[in-house]
């Protein structure tokens, strides 16, 4: 046992001699000092990163808490299923009413369009009737002029015969006449009417 302690002592002394020899070298001490400096810089950088991470974690935790508050507020504002069902039913009723009103509006619009077309058609007819009345008035004026000049009032209803009445105001008589255009030529008809006038 004494020998083993002596061996161990000799090993320890040998190790310490090697360590002293190692430490005596300047390069090794310089390298060791560089390692310590790098280690200190790395530790400082790690502490800075840790501080930033702690700040970020704190910010994120505040944001998470704010989101939780907002979520709770939204949950409080959200209506129950019964309220949602009631609101949906009211919405459906309003949409149905809107649809009915749109149908009614379409029907009214169609009626207005039909009335507008009728008004336009009536206006056209009124213009035609007005023109016909003017033409009839002109024709009556012409007939009146012909009657005063020739004493003959022609009957314009039948195009296949020349007919009318001879009016004598002095004698207060009306004599009807009729000439067939199928039996007489236009020249003979004109001569016959001329003889009636003179």
Image: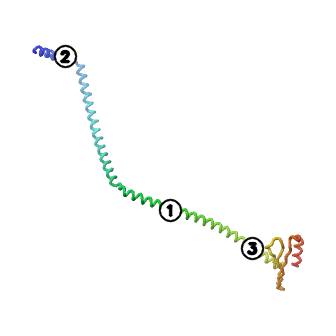
Q: Mark 3 or 2 closer to N-term?
A: 2
CA distance separating discs 3 and 2: 148 Å
Nearer-the-camera pick, 193 or 91: 91
Q: Residue at x 36, y 55 (%)?
A: 81
Task: Sort mark 2 into few (<14), some (14-19) or many (20+) by Cα contacts within 10 Å.
Answer: few
Residue highlighted by disc 2: 18
Tag 2, which secondary structure? Answer: helix
Secondary structure under tag 1 reads helix
Residue in the picture at 25% in, 28% down = 39
Question: Mark 3 or mark 1, which has the lower sequence index?
Answer: 1
Which class describes the residues within 10 Å of circle 1: few (<14), some (14-19), or many (20+)?
few
Mark 3 residue element:
helix
Q: Quadrant of residue 121?
A: bottom right
In the image, 67: left or right of 163? left
- The vertical placement of 73 against 145, above or below, is above
Residue 175: x percent and y percent? 84, 81
* Residue 198 image offset from top left, x and y in percent: 88, 79
Query: Label 1, label 2: how many angstroms apart (C-alpha)?
Result: 106 Å
Above or below residue 147? Residue 56 is: above
- Label disc, if present, on residue 136 of the rendered structure: 3
User: Badge 3, how many Cα within 10 Å: few under 14, some, many 20+?
Assistant: few
Q: CA distance from mark 3 to mark 1?
A: 52 Å
Q: Is residue 92 left or right of residue 33?
A: right
x 36%, y 57%: residue: 82
- Whole-percent x and y of residue 38? 27, 27
**Mark nearer the N terminus (1 vs 2):** 2
Q: Nearer the viewer, mark 1 or mark 2?
A: 1
Determine which quarter of the picture holds residue 78.
bottom left
Q: Identify residue for label 1.
A: 100
């Amino acid at each position: 046992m004494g020998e083993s302690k002596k061996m161990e002592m000799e090993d320890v002394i040998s190790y310490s001699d090697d360590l002293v020899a190692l430490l005596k070298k300047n390069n090794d001490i310089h390298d060791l000092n560089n390692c310590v400096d790098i280690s200190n810089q790395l530790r400082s950088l790690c502490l800075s990163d840790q501080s930033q991470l702690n700040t970020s974690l704190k910010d994120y935790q505040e944001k998470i808490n704010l989101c939780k508050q907002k979520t709770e507020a939204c949950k409080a504002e959200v209506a129950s299923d019964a309220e949602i069902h009631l609101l949906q039913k009211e919405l459906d009723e309003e949409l149905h009413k809107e649809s009915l009103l749109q149908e009614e509006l379409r029907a009214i619009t169609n009626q207005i369009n039909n009335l507008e077309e009728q008004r336009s058609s009536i206006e056209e007819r009124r213009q035609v009737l007005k023109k016909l009345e003017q033409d009839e008035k002109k024709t009556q004026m012409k007939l009146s002029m012909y009657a005063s000049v020739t004493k003959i009032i022609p009957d314009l209803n039948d195009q296949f015969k020349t007919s009318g009445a001879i009016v004598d105001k002095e004698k207060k008589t009306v004599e009807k006449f009729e000439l067939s255009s199928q039996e007489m030529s236009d020249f003979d008809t004109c001569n016959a009417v001329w003889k009636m006038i003179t």
